[in-house]
Amino acid sequence: MLKNLVLDVAEAAANIQLKEPRMLEIPAPCYVLGDIHGNLLDLTFFRRILWPAGPEAQGADFLFLGDFVDRGADSLPVVAYMMAQKVLNPRKWWMIRGNHETREVNGNIKTYREGSFLHQCLRIFGDADGRTVWESVNCFFDTLPLAARVANRVFCVHGGIPKELCQPGASLEMVNETPNPLKLVRRGDMVHSMLWSDPVPPDRETAVEVQQQLDSQGFGLSSRGCSCFGEKTLDIFMEQHRVSYVFRGHEAQQHGIGLSRSTRLCTIFSTSKDHFAPEVKTTCGCVLVNRDGILPIVRGQPQQPKGSKTLGMRQGRLPLQQIDGNTNRNKMGVKLEELEKSKEDARLFVC
Ligand SMILES: [Mn+2]
């Protein structure tokens, strides 16, 4: 019976994650994917391209930055698939928690309607069983790790950098002190900022009125009413924790991947649907963190010129920066405009 299968997989995956640290250390090579949001079609695209014979047949690990459910039509198949991969490949398949992996968000039928994870569970299983399945998957969510460091130098989180990790003497080890399971993510807690915060939008970063609203560490208030962080925050965080990049999801990206002005912060979105602007054509992407560099991978635009059926996924290369101790600026990184240009030059075609 499908219900029992999902309950068993959720429990088995949760038992694995109960033994994992809250802050993962993942070696390179590792593919990092952002929000999936119940989009089974894009997840299937990535499966075909990145792990056609299963994750176990690949040399790389896979890390997902949260927001598996809600908004899209297929939250349950998506999360069931992901939990099953965790059980099958516990040391290769990693997931961290997004703000939608909380009961207050994925149980909010009023806001997300047919896109709500709870609504979809009730529709598939009926009221009583639907609620049981929803609760068991949420118990799995309670055990999700909260951040990861890939290749020792890429900090990965769903939303952004919390103030607590920028205080003098703070270490990433603090993330490991979070209880496991964690049922309630309270506003004001460090975990809440990690799941909810946003960077100051690149085009607003230099605006005087924005600068005035940010504190001495670059923190302010985001348009969601949660914390936001600026370039100053990245200066402090990256120097203190000796990382070269911050990867996060949480915000839709028209081109699948977005870079901050200094190219140190990368927003990854792995569903091609922007539910806030359905009329805008968007695509999805992920990033491969290799031993010698990072490689953005973007799905080709859905609308293709006739005859262009080449399968491809390469899209320019951002070398991994070495930390030289004097500065944590991304000297070897490319400018946003250059990435935009490389997108034109190396337009990707997919079937
Ligand atoms: Mn999010």
Image (cartoon, rainbow, N blue to C red):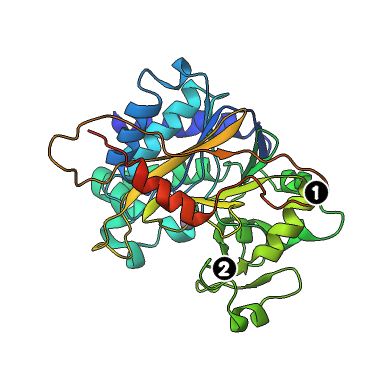
Of the 4 image quadrants, the one containing the C terminus is top left
Could you say whether the residue bearing mark 1 is in a helix, strand or loop?
A: loop
Q: Give SS at disc 2.
A: loop
x and y, in percent, of residue 208 in the image: 62, 82
- In the figure, 308 relative to 105: above or below? above
Find disc 2 in the rendering and name its residue: 200
Q: Which residue is mark 1?
A: 171
Q: Residue lying furthest left in this view? A: 306
- Pinpoint residue 152: horizontal percent, then vertical percent: 70, 35
* 6, 260: nearer the viewer: 260
Residue 100 visible in the snapshot: no
Q: Nearer the viewer, residue 331 or 201?
A: 331
Task: Please tell me which residue is depicted at 30% across the width and 42% down the height of the picture.
Answer: 300
* Residues at marks 2 and 1 touching, judged by CB atoms closer than 8 Å: no
Crowding at dot 2, Cα within 10 Å, few <14 / some 14-19 / many 20+, comes out as: many
| Residue 207: % across, % down | 58, 79
What residue lies at 72% left-to-right and 39% top-to-bottom?
A: 322
